[in-house]
Structure formats: C-alpha cells, structure tokens
Image: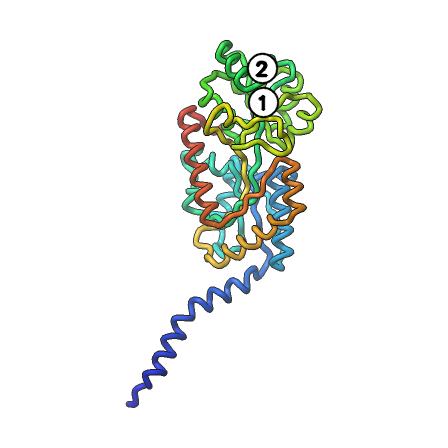
C-alpha cells in the first residue's frame, strides 16, 4: 500500500485545524438567520420596553433581520428571564437585562435559574441615576440636614418607593444603612402611583428615577437633595452626588443585553459590536444625557464583571435589611 506523501499529510492536518475557525467565521457571518426576540420582563410602554425597542431598531438596521420585542412581565422580571435562560443558545433569543436581575438574584430563594451562571452577558446599554427628592416644604435642604433631622426624629419620615425590593426601594435602604437613619418605607405599585403623595406632602421623601422626576424638580414641585450616581449629572449640575456626603454610595439603574449560556462566542461578539456601534451615535448620546442617562458600552467580560458586582452589592443590603419578595 502506498503511503501518503508527508506534505500531503501536513496539508490535511492544517486543513483540519482550520475547520473550527472557518466554522466560527461562517456562523458569525450567517447570524442572524431569522428574526430575533428581545424578551423584556416588563409591560409595554415601560422604560425597559422603550429601551428594548430602541436597541432592537438599531440592531435590525445593522444586522439585517428584525429584532422584535416580546414583553413577558411578572415576578419582578423573573418570568421573562427564565424564558431566555430556557431558550436555545443560538443568539435568536435575547434578554433585556436590568438592575432588577441583580436584586432578584438574592431576593428570591428558589429561582429556577442562577442569573450569573445561566446567562451569557453580551453588552451594557445605559446606566441611569436615581435622585433623592423631598417635598418643597420639608425643612431639610441638604443631605446633611436631612440626616440630622432624621436622627432627631427616628421613624417620623415616610419614604415612598415604587414597590417592595424594587431598585428605588433598595436605593433608599442603602441610604438608610449608610446614613444610620430610621425611615418608614411606604411601598406603592409603581413610581407614578407614589409621586402624587410626595407632591401633596403625604410622604416626605423618595428615591425617584431622574427622567421621570426631572420635570417636577425643574418646576420646583420637588426639591432634589442628591443624585445616586458616583458623580453629578450634566442635566442637574447643581445637585450633588450622594457620594459627596456618604463616600462609596452608588445606586444606578442599568440595562443591558444578555443571551442564554453556551451562546457561541462569535455570535456574542457580533451582537456586542453592533450594540456598541449604536451607542456611539451622537444623537442617541445627547438624548440619553438629557434624560440623565449615560451610555454604557464595553466588552462582554466587562459587563459580566459589572453584573457580578451589582449582585454582591445588593445582596449585602437585602440580607442586612431582611427584604423578602411580596
């Protein structure tokens, strides 16, 4: 039997070694091959829904297939998250991940998934600040004055929130922990429901979302004491950051895109590049800045590290306060 020539063997070996790389390139080039679902764990018309549709629009334009938002609200976003976790890891089912996911990882004892283990982080989209506001008649005009008054009147100040264990609630609980004050939490079913009671003075303070609070602050219907990002915001330049009074305080909301675990790396990288490209649009950046939001581009690894840090941060608050889901 004639043995194959050594050079022929080497060519075959080289070709075999190149097959995985060729397969990866082909898979990336053929993605997406059909419409892609972006699952949003909130109702239509909500802030996550609006952002999900915006992202879907520019991904459709860049990748040539429809990216369709699918609303799956319920259980603090867990229903939508589980739908994605159980989805096929082929890049055609994505999740609009939010700060709720970081809170829920500790808040719920018996989830059917582990968020950080069972998702593949793709990219951050935005971070947005909350703002500590009080009724204009409240005597404290600064955070130090508020803390001094709260310590002198423990249990006498009502703190509204958008609901038990929501991002706005845990932002307030982090403030209570770090400031050492006793505020009475009053949970509402959403920030819009809580706002009228703050405007009327029935509750004295709230940690609200900047975009929805901004008109009331500018019209002097609310007094802003501090924003919850590490630094001041361009849209509220005279309002200090909470960290100026409580070093280390930070409680930003955030949105990003995630996929089921085991989604091929080249597909994750294709999505990451397309999302980051959309975030460089100057009009998008200006519009988001006007709403108190910041674009949050980065690599999948950076987004994973960020999410893990958020889970750890809110776990400490939830366990210290003893928060439980409703």
Specify the label residue 140 is tagged with.
2
Position above or below: 140 against 10: above
Residue 286 screen position, x and y as percent: 66, 42
Instruction: Please name the colour scheme applied to the rendered image.
Output: rainbow
On-image quarter of the N terminus: bottom left
**Looking at the rendering, which quadrant does residue 137 occupy?**
top right
Disc 2: CA contacts within 10 A as few (<14), some (14-19) or many (>=20):
some
Image x and y of residue 123, in percent: 52, 48
| Horizontal and vertical percent position of residue 215 | 69, 28
**Residue at figure coordinates x 62%, y 26% from the top left:** 238
Give me the disc on residue 119. Answer: none
Q: Choose top left, top right, bottom left or bottom right for residue 157.
A: top right
Res. 258 visible in picture: yes
Q: CA distance from mark 2 to mark 1?
A: 9 Å
Q: Residue at x 71, y 24 (%)?
A: 219
Give the secondary structure at mark 1.
strand
Please state the horizontal and vertical placement of residue 185, each as a whole percent of the image.
Answer: 52, 20
Camera-side residue: 150 or 166?
150
In front of the other: 77 or 148: 148
- The answer to whether marks 2 and 1 mark residues whose Cβ atoms lie closer than 8 Å is yes
Q: Could you tell which of marks 2 and 1 lies nearer the N-terminus?
A: 2
- Label 2: state its secondary structure: loop
One can see residue 113 in this view: no
Hey, which residue is sitting farthest bottom in the picture?
1
246 versus 29 height, above or below: above
Mark identifier at residue 225: 1
Q: Residue at x 43, y 24 (%)?
A: 321
Q: Is residue 272 above or below residue 106?
A: below
* Residue lying at the far top of the rendered structure: 152
163 or 19: which is nearer to us? 19
Counting every numbered tag in the picture gives 2
């Amino acid at each position: 039997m004639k043995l194959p020539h050594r050079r022929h063997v080497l060519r075959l070996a080289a070709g075999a070694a190149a097959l995985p790389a060729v397969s990866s390139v082909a898979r990336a080039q053929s993605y997406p091959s059909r419409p892609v679902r972006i699952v949003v764990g909130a109702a239509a018309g909500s802030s996550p829904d609006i952002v999900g549709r915006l992202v879907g629009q520019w991904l459709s334009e860049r990748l040539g297939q429809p990216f369709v938002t699918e609303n799956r609200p319920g259980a603090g976003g867990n229903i939508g998250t589980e739908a994605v976790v159980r989805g096929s890891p082929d890049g055609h089912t994505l999740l609009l991940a939010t700060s709720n996911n970081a809170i829920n990882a500790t808040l719920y004892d018996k989830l059917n998934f582990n968020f950080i283990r069972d998702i593949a982080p793709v990219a951050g989209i935005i971070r947005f600040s909350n703002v500590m506001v009080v009724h204009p008649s409240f005597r404290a005009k600064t955070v130090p004055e508020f803390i001094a008054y709260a310590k002198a009147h423990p249990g006498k100040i009502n703190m509204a929130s958008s609901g038990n264990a929501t991002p706005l609630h845990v932002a307030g609980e982090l403030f209570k922990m770090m400031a050492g004050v006793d505020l009475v939490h009053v949970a509402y079913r959403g920030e819009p429901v809580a706002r009228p009671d703050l405007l009327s003075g029935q509750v004295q303070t709230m940690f609200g979302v900047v975009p929805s609070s901004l008109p009331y602050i500018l019209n002097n219907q609310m007094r802003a004491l501090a924003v919850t990002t590490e630094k001041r915001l361009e849209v509220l330049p005279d309002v200090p950051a909470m960290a100026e009074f409580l070093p280390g305080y930070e409680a930003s909301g955030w949105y990003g895109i995630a996929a089921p675990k085991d989604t091929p790396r080249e597909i994750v990288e294709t999505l990451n590049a397309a999302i980051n490209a959309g975030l460089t649009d100057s009009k998008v950046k200006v519009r988001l800045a006007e709403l108190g939001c910041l674009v949050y581009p980065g690599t999948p690894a950076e987004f994973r590290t960020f999410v893990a840090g958020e889970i750890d941060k809110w776990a400490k608050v939830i366990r210290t306060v003893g928060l439980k889901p409703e």
